[in-house]
Amino acid sequence: MSGTSTLAPATLRAYQETEYRVLGSEGFVLRVGHPSAELLAAHQRHQVACSAFLTACNPWSQPTAAALNAARQAELRAELERRSLLHVPGLGQHPGNGWPGEDSVLVFGLALQAARALAARFDQNALVWSGADAVPELVLLR
């Protein structure tokens, strides 16, 4: 986990325990702090050295109406398309706390500073970023 935070310990724990699922033909789960052979293979396949798992849903981790979350997520995807960034669908979901899964994306080749800026633009508390070692890390923004 990188950064200092003003977030509640329970919120931080939930982020660390969440399963960050990569959907579609990619099909694998990322867990903070756990190396991912599937992510490493995806990095190699897409010829990148990093990736970011992002969402635009539930700003500041506050429950938000489904329609607004969908619009925010569509805006995030449009921004990724505008930047010509390869991305695949994802879903961030805690395995047992009852919080609904959040529509997300895994973005290939997005450098850490660019990922931080994009997540901040969509009012997120944190993001999951992986470097060349394919070990997802929780990056705190607040």
Image: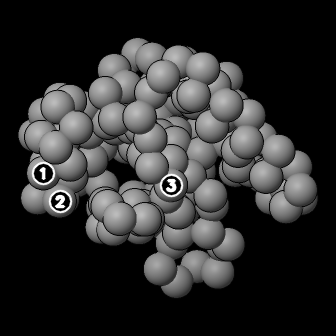
In the rendered image, which residue does mark 2 sit on? 38
* Residue at 43% across, 65% down: 24
Crowd around label 2: few <14 · some 14–19 · many ≥20 (10 Å): some
Callout 2: SS? helix
Q: Is residue 106 left or right of residue 29?
A: right
In the rendered image, which residue does mark 3 sit on? 89
The correct choice, above or below, for 107 with respect to 35 in the image is above
| Type of amino acid at the residue the image marks with label 2 | Glu
* Residue at 13% across, 48% down: 40
Mark 1–mark 2 Cα distance, whole angstroms, equals 5 Å
- Quadrant where the N terminus lies? top left
The correct choice, above or below, for 125 with respect to 10 in the image is above
Q: Position of residue 19 (x, y in %)?
A: 41, 67
Q: Which mark is residue 41?
A: 1
- Quadrant where the C terminus lies? top right
* Residue at 40% across, 16% down: 113
Q: Nearer the viewer, residue 124 or 106?
A: 106
